Amino acid sequence: MADNNKFIVTPKDEKSVTLTIRIYPEINTKLERLAQQSNRSRNELINKALEFAFNNLEFVDGNE
């Protein structure tokens, strides 16, 4: 039988990291507008945009 008088804490599984960035005001305005229109969080939209960018990235080394 469980003891109802205990406050049980388990280790947190890290699923994300906190990152602070600076963005241009125009980008923030567009992000806020899209978040409201799509009913998604800014965080979710930023993650989707970064994932898309990395999946479609072509790195060109300037030394070639």
Image (tube, helix red, strand yellow):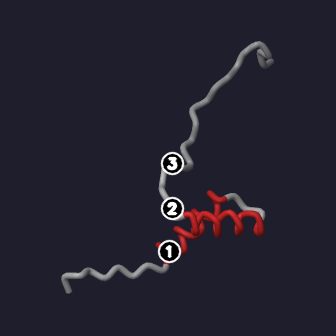
- Which one is closest to the eye, mark 2 or mark 1? 2
Residue 6 position in % (x across, y down): 72, 15
- CA separation, marks 1 and 3? 19 Å
The part of the image, by quadrant, that contains residue 30 is bottom right
The part of the image, by quadrant, that contains residue 11 is top right
Q: Nearer the viewer, residue 16 or 49?
A: 49
Quadrant for the N terminus in the image: top right
The part of the image, by quadrant, that contains residue 39 is bottom right
Residue 49 position in % (x across, y down): 57, 70
Look at 58% across and 36% down and name the residue there. Answer: 12
Q: Nearer the viewer, residue 5 or 2?
A: 5
Within 10 angstroms of label 3, few (less than 14), some, or many (20 or more) residues?
few
Q: Earlier in the sequence, mark 1 or mark 3?
A: 3
Residue 33 position in % (x across, y down): 71, 67
Residue 62 position in % (x across, y down): 24, 82
Q: Amino acid at mark 1?
A: Ala
Query: Helix, strand or loop at disc 2?
Result: loop
- Which one is closest to the eye, mark 2 or mark 3? 2
Query: Helix, strand or loop at disc 3?
Result: loop
Query: Helix, strand or loop at disc 1?
Result: helix
- CA separation, marks 2 and 3? 18 Å
Q: Earlier in the sequence, mark 2 or mark 1?
A: 2
The residue under label 2 is 23
Look at 57% across and 68% down and name the residue there. Answer: 27
Look at 48% across and 57% down and name the residue there. Answer: 22
Q: Residue furthest left?
A: 63
Q: Amino acid at mark 3?
A: Val
- CA separation, marks 2 and 1? 16 Å
Residue 53 marker: 1
Q: Earlier in the sequence, mark 2 or mark 3?
A: 3
The residue under label 3 is 17
